[in-house]
Image (cartoon, rainbow, N blue to C red):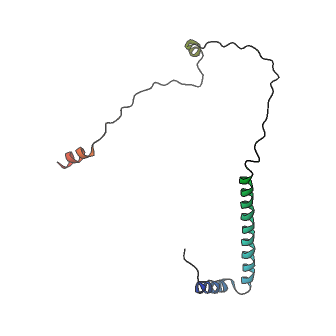
């Protein structure tokens, strides 16, 4: 990005004076200054919040929660799953489609192709 020297600044100010007029130019300068000041303040506060959050990351560990079970323990017996039991109750929304093999084209040697086309 090129540097703006004093000559370029004078040209910019003259163009702004012609476009906006001598009465509106001070108002535009004040509003531009206020906008830049607010932008700097908000970016500085955001930067401060991020710095504090990163520095206090280790100090603010998540609390540990312990859950105590109040249900008495019972014996659970597992029933074996057989393929016939699964086939007896198929899911209603699953449709079985046959799987077909797709032929894979052989690798093409471009040099041989060029020779056959040229020769």
Side of 81 where 20 appears, left or right = right
Does residue 63 lie above or below 92 as drawn? below
Side of 16 where 27 appears, left or right = right
The quadrant holding residue 112 is: top left
Residue 47 in picture, x, y percent from top left: 71, 61
Question: Total label count?
Answer: 0
Residue 33 in picture, x, y percent from top left: 73, 76
Residue 29 in picture, x, y percent from top left: 72, 79
Side of 14 where 114 appears, left or right = left
Side of 51 where 3 appears, left or right = left
Q: Nearer the viewer, residue 17 or 40?
A: 40
Q: Nearer the viewer, residue 19 or 14?
A: 14
Residue 46 in picture, x, y percent from top left: 73, 60
Does residue 12 lie above or below 100 as drawn? below
For image coordinates 75% across by 67% down, the residue present is 41
Does residue 68 lie above or below 46 as drawn? above
For image coordinates 74% across by 83% down, the residue present is 26
For image coordinates 57% across by 13% down, the residue present is 82
Residue that protrudes farthest toward the right in the picture:
70
Q: State the quadrant of the N terminus.
A: bottom right
For image coordinates 64% across by 12% down, the residue present is 79
Residue that protrudes farthest toward the left in the picture:
119
Does residue 80 lie above or below 59 as drawn? above
The quadrant holding residue 110 is: top left
């Amino acid at each position: 990005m090129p540097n703006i020297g004093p000559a370029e600044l004078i040209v910019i100010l003259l163009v702004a004076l012609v476009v906006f007029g001598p009465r509106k130019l001070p108002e535009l300068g004040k509003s531009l200054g206020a906008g830049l000041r607010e932008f700097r303040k908000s970016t500085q506060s955001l930067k401060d919040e991020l710095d504090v959050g990163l520095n206090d990351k280790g100090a603010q560990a998540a609390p540990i929660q312990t859950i105590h079970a109040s249900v008495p323990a019972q014996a659970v017996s597992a029933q074996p799953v057989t393929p016939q039991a699964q086939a007896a109750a198929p899911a209603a929304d699953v449709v079985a489609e046959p799987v077909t093999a797709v032929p894979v084209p052989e690798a093409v040697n471009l040099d041989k192709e060029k020779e056959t086309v040229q020769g």
